[in-house]
Amino acid sequence: MLVVKNNHPRMKEAIAYLFDNPPWTASEKAVEYQRYTTTDKGHGRIERRILETSASLNDYLDWPGLQQVMKRTIRRTIVKTGEVSESITYGITSLPPEKADARTLERLWRGHWPIENRVHYVRDVSMGEDAGRSHRGNAPVVLAFLRNLVLSLLRLMGWDSIPSAFRYYRTRLRESLQLLGLPPRTDGL
């Protein structure tokens, strides 16, 4: 399961267009389209989540293993104020509809967000991964491994805020080397 962001604008536009202008008729809807809705109350808000799925773009989108596209709409209402907000997110999955219906995909999506927030968002924003220019050979894989290694080391050291950890270690070469398991320099630098 992958969240489709602005770094894949054509894919995002195609998925949005599909759900805004569905090509299936009422009789085809059961085969081409699924929808699952949940409502939860907690943390002072009511959240209604609608996950819509379709396999209609499998032959159109050029993505290896693509089996379904998804649109997830979250409508949040703050109980105290009545303030309402809505967000729409798009995604893709390699799970076919017969193995993962809309309900299953919603559960997977909810479980995916802690990973998205703690790893992918940090790599994209704090580490600038999306702005990287290394796209050839093994460089992207090696750099992703190194980013994950740094994140894991910082989390093991108890850092919850990765930007704070970066600010801390940016000016402390000795501690940075120790974090990596390297001996401190003895030449005074």
Image: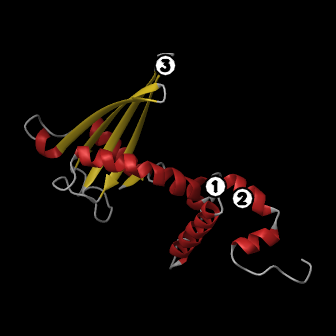
Query: Is 129 placed left or right of 67 in the picture?
Result: right
User: Where on the picture, by quarter, is residue 33?
Assistant: top left
| Label 2 sits on residue | 166
Residue 38 seen anywhere in this rendered image of the structure:
yes
Vertical placement of residue 21 versus 115, above or below: above
Residue closest to the eye, 159 or 21: 159
Q: Nearer the viewer, mark 2 or mark 1?
A: 2
| Residue 6 percent location from the top left of the image | 48, 48
Question: Given contact means CB atoms under 8 Å apart, are the residues at marks 3 and 1 in contact?
Answer: no
User: Where on the picture, by quarter, is residue 177?
Assistant: bottom right
What colour-coding does the image apply?
secondary structure
Vertical placement of residue 125 versus 17, above or below: below
| Label 1 sits on residue | 126
* Distance in Å between CA atoms under marks 2 and 1: 9 Å
| Residue 141 percent location from the top left of the image | 51, 73
Q: Residue at horizontal 90%, vertical 83%?
A: 187
Query: Is 145 placed left or right of 103 in the picture?
Result: right
Question: Label 2 sits on what residue type?
Answer: Phe
Q: Quadrant of the C terminus?
A: bottom right
Question: Given contact means CB atoms under 8 Å apart, are the residues at marks 2 and 1 in contact?
Answer: yes
Q: Residue at horizontal 23%, vertical 38%?
A: 35
Q: Residue at horizontal 72%, vertical 59%?
A: 166
Q: Residue at horizontal 33%, vertical 62%?
A: 63
Query: Is 148 placed left or right of 41 in the picture?
Result: right
Question: Label 1 sits on what residue type?
Answer: Ser
| Label 3 sits on residue | 83
Mark 1: which secondary structure?
helix
* Distance in Å between CA atoms under marks 3 and 1: 31 Å
Number of marks present in the image shown: 3
Question: Label 3 sits on what residue type?
Answer: Glu
Residue 4 seen anywhere in this rendered image of the structure:
no
